[in-house]
Image: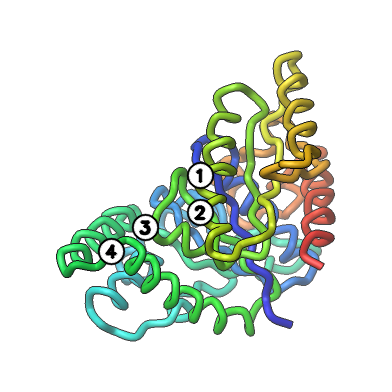
């Protein structure tokens, strides 16, 4: 079966996008799904979280070997080399084990160079009189072609998008079957949600993206303020002119959802990486996501 593509995105940073991406990817992999994480954030936190205990060394090696998503852009749009995304896949990248076996999770790592590469691409093509629409079209077509090839090898492809919007991010969102928007139920975070579900998604709907993004409430601390905002978000999701839907699952503000891989030591189990009731919460989210992908 062709893979389903999930994007984890929000205009605002610090809302738990990377944690959502990696925890969900590991849950899919543990359930037997062939899973790939595509890291599109220049901070490369998803890459580090997937790699685990020796993440710094692995990421440094990938950057030195020109084997990141940034290098895919460079090869295809600067060097005129026909390199596929599949050429940049790190197989079995995770150091996590589950049921006594290594977790079969693959990764296309990111790099701090990515944002600079995207800017240089915009400068070069606009200097050649390309419009932004044409630029997005070129990158989008190549990305879709490569994703279609990758889909034959995986059941699920999960993309960790950076805060804001970029050529790469918009192209990935347009190719997604499900867009998950992690959002802290507080005033500042819902401003970012309004921007994302308003302008950005409106632009994507102009490109035949019909499904609404699905909001995941994260870092919920159960204060009266967050309770009120969460209820308001749920009511907005049920309105006739709703711009988003919502998961029932709520991710609590707990240290188990932000474990430092270095502190875990080498070769942790999945249960050790997501301790306490974190793993059961992730499983609940996994079940909801699978229902939406049917």
Please indicate whether residue 104 sits to the left or right of residue 160 in the image: right
What residue is drawn where x is 20% and y is 59%? 123
- Of mark 4 and mark 2, the one earlier in the sequence is 4
Tell which of 241 and 146 is nearer to you.
241
Asked if disc 1 and disc 2 are in contact, CB closer than 8 Å, the reply is yes
Which corner quadrant holds the N terminus?
bottom right
Helix, strand or loop under label 1: helix
Residue 175, how many percent across, how many down? 56, 68
Rendered image: mark on residue 199: 1
- Of mark 4 and mark 3, the one earlier in the sequence is 3
Between the residue at mark 4 and the residue at mark 2, the CA separation in whole angstroms equals: 16 Å
Rendered image: mark on residue 131: 4
What is the quadrant of residue 216 in the picture?
Answer: top right
Helix, strand or loop under label 4: loop
Asked if disc 1 and disc 3 are in contact, CB closer than 8 Å, the reply is no
- Of mark 1 and mark 3, the one earlier in the sequence is 3
Q: How is the image coloured?
A: rainbow
Residue 90, how many percent across, how many down? 50, 72
Asked if disc 4 and disc 3 are in contact, CB closer than 8 Å, the reply is no
Circle 3 is placed at which residue position?
111
Between the residue at mark 1 and the residue at mark 2, the CA separation in whole angstroms equals: 6 Å
Circle 2 is placed at which residue position?
203
Asked if disc 2 and disc 3 are in contact, CB closer than 8 Å, the reply is no
- Of mark 1 and mark 4, the one earlier in the sequence is 4
- Of mark 2 and mark 3, the one earlier in the sequence is 3
Question: How many numbered circles are shown?
Answer: 4
Residue 112, how many percent across, how many down? 33, 53
Helix, strand or loop under label 3: loop
């Amino acid at each position: 079966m062709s893979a389903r593509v999930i994007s984890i995105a929000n205009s605002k940073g610090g809302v738990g996008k990377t944690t959502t991406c990696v925890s969900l990817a590991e849950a899919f992999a543990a359930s037997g799904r062939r899973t790939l994480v595509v890291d599109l954030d220049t901070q490369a936190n998803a890459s580090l979280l997937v790699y685990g205990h020796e993440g710094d060394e692995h990421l440094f090696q990938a950057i030195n070997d020109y084997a990141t998503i940034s290098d895919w852009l460079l090869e295809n749009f600067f060097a005129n080399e026909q390199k596929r995304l599949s050429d940049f896949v790190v197989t079995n990248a995770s150091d996590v084990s589950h049921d006594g076996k290594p977790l079969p999770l693959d990764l296309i790592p990111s790099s701090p160079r990515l944002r600079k590469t995207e800017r240089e691409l915009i400068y070069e093509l606009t200097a050649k009189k390309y419009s932004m629409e044409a630029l997005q079209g070129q990158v989008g077509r190549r990305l879709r072609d490569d994703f279609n090839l990758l889909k034959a090898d995986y059941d699920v492809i999960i993309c960790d998008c950076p805060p804001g919007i970029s050529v790469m991010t918009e192209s990935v969102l347009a190719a997604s079957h499900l867009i998950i928007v992690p959002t802290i139920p507080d005033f500042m975070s819902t401003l970012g949600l309004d921007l994302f579900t308003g302008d950005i998604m409106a632009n994507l709907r102009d490109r035949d993206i019909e499904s609404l993004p699905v909001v995941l409430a994260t870092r919920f601390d159960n204060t009266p303020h967050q309770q009120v905002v969460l209820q308001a978000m749920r009511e907005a999701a049920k309105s006739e002119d709703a711009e988003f839907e919502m998961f029932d699952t709520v991710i609590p503000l707990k240290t188990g959802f932000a474990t430092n891989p270095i502190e875990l030591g080498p070769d942790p189990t999945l249960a050790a990486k997501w301790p306490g009731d974190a793993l059961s919460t992730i499983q609940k989210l996994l079940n909801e996501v699978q229902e939406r992908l049917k």
